Image: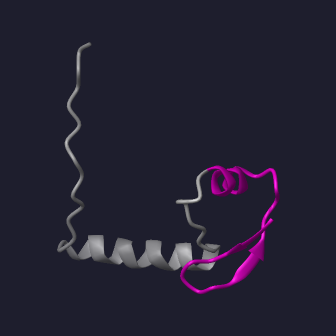
Amino acid sequence: MRVKCVICDKIEPIEDESPIAKRLRNRPIHTYMCQSCNERISEKTQARIDTGNFRLYRSKSEDDEW
């Protein structure tokens, strides 16, 4: 399967039976990022977290006893 990175538009082949390929086939809303873009974003995010000015807003999950 050939996939295209949403950031750099680089086309890469991935194995047809890999979990990433199955996720892309079954749920088209999921997008693919190449490894270099993924690493670059994770490094920049970690640098922002280290500055202390980064807040991650997550919704509060309510634990239901039932």
Which residue is rendered at x = 70% and y = 50% of the image?
22
Range drawn in magenta: 1-26
Relative placement, left or right, of 22 versus 66 is: right
Residue in front for this viewpoint, 2 or 49: 2
Query: Looking at the picture, how far across and down is residue 52, in whole percent?
Result: 19, 71
Query: Which quadrant is home to the C terminus?
Result: top left
Query: Looking at the picture, how far across and down is residue 57, in whole percent?
Result: 21, 58
Query: Looking at the picture, how far across and down is residue 4, in whole percent?
Result: 67, 77
Query: Which quadrant is home to the N terminus?
Result: bottom right
Which residue is rendered at x = 29% and y = 76% of the image?
48
Residue in front for this viewpoint, 19 or 37: 19
Q: Is residue 62 above or below residue 49?
A: above
Q: Is residue 11 above or below residue 20?
A: below
Q: Is residue 4 above or below residue 22?
A: below
Relative placement, left or right, of 55 versus 31 is: left
Which residue is rendered at x = 40% and y = 79% of the image?
44
Q: Is residue 22 magenta-colored?
A: yes
